[in-house]
Amino acid sequence: MARPVVSCVLVVLAVVGCTGEAGTKAPGPSVDLSNDIEITSSQPFAGFPVEKMRTLEEIRRKLVYRCMVERRYRYYEQADPEAAPRLSPLLTLDRELVGWATEAHARGQGFGTNLPAVPAKVVASNTNHDKVLRNCVAEFRRKTGPHHRKVFRRAGDLRDEMSREYSDAVDSARLDELKAPVVECLADAGFDAEAEKRERFGLRPETFGIERGGPEGGQREPRLKREPGTIEVLPASPARRYVPSAKEAELAVAMFRCQHETGAVDVLRALVNDAQQVVWNRHEDELAELKKELAALVKAGTELL
């Protein structure tokens, strides 16, 4: 799921991926993922160990934050390294393929994505901070060893490989065949579009000239000075629900009804699962070994806390 992008100091990007996160947990409840979990739980890729990867990343942040606090960078003292709940990026949530859980889900969600809560972030443009941060990351790497980095990197690479292979494994001709009656049904419901636009955008709001909605409360841009030598804290933001435009909600409901009236949605979901299963079987042995190694890394990392 999408989350707001915060500019990262170049040196921090190079060593830890992004700025440090600090402050208390983001306020407000998490977004409701139950409907999307329901329609993706049967996908074979749901078995990929993304939670173990997330736990390892949280352990890394805890240790690096602790190191920064010990070096008197107290911005990190109240750091909450835990990530907000979100679906695995490997799961297929394209509404054209898997639809929605219920008509109410379609009406309320449209074609958008909820924004998870984001903890406060330390954004630094300070050479002394950057030097200390590099040292803390180096200390973390010494504690965890090269095998930790190797396994974690391989997990990320395998995730990306499987995502690409899935795209190739999907029977696109069969997909077009299954979507044809849905396209006709949508036209009967008043949602018609040129074939060229359907080819370019698929069955999405843009195809029908419909403006999308956005996150509840509108887009929120961080207000930071970003002046050389400064260290600033970007405040935490709560989880926010995506609110579709009125016309987008109408299209989503029409598509939900068409997918079910034509019987296409069950076959489309099966097609998605079949393609994922082909890829999963191809990497089954490596995945089994990876799960064991990641579990061992989590155990070792937890003992360092």
Image: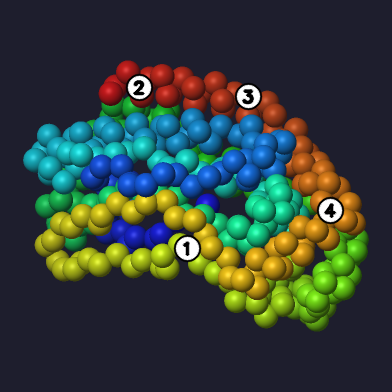
What type is the residue that disc 1 sits on? Pro
The image's mark for residue 215 is 1
Task: Tell me the crowding category of disc 4: few under 14, some 14 to 19, or many 20 or more residues within 10 angstroms, Cα based.
Answer: few
x, y percent for residue 140: 28, 33
x, y percent for residue 84: 42, 42
| 238 horizontally vs 105: left or right | left
Labels 3, 2: front one: 2
Vertical order, 188 against 68 (above or below): below
The image's mark for residue 260 is 4
Write the residue at 15% across / 51% down: 129
Dot 2 falls on a residue whose secondary structure is helix
Vertical order, 236 against 40 (above or below): below
Labelled pair 4, 3 in contact (Cβ < 8 Å): no
The C terminus sits in image quarter: top left
Task: Tell me the crowding category of disc 3: few under 14, some 14 to 19, or many 20 or more residues within 10 angstroms, Cα based.
Answer: few
Task: Tell me the crowding category of disc 2: few under 14, some 14 to 19, or many 20 or more residues within 10 angstroms, Cα based.
Answer: few
Q: Which of disc 1 and disc 2 is earlier in sequence?
A: 1
For label 3, the residue is: 288
Task: Tell me the crowding category of disc 1: few under 14, some 14 to 19, or many 20 or more residues within 10 angstroms, Cα based.
Answer: some
Along the line of sight, which residue is nearer the eye, 180 or 66? 180
The image's mark for residue 302 is 2
Q: Is residue 245 visible?
A: yes
Q: Which of disc 1 and disc 4 is earlier in sequence?
A: 1
Labels 2, 4: front one: 4
Along the line of sight, which residue is nearer the eye, 144 or 272? 272
What type is the residue that disc 4 sits on? His
Dot 1 falls on a residue whose secondary structure is strand
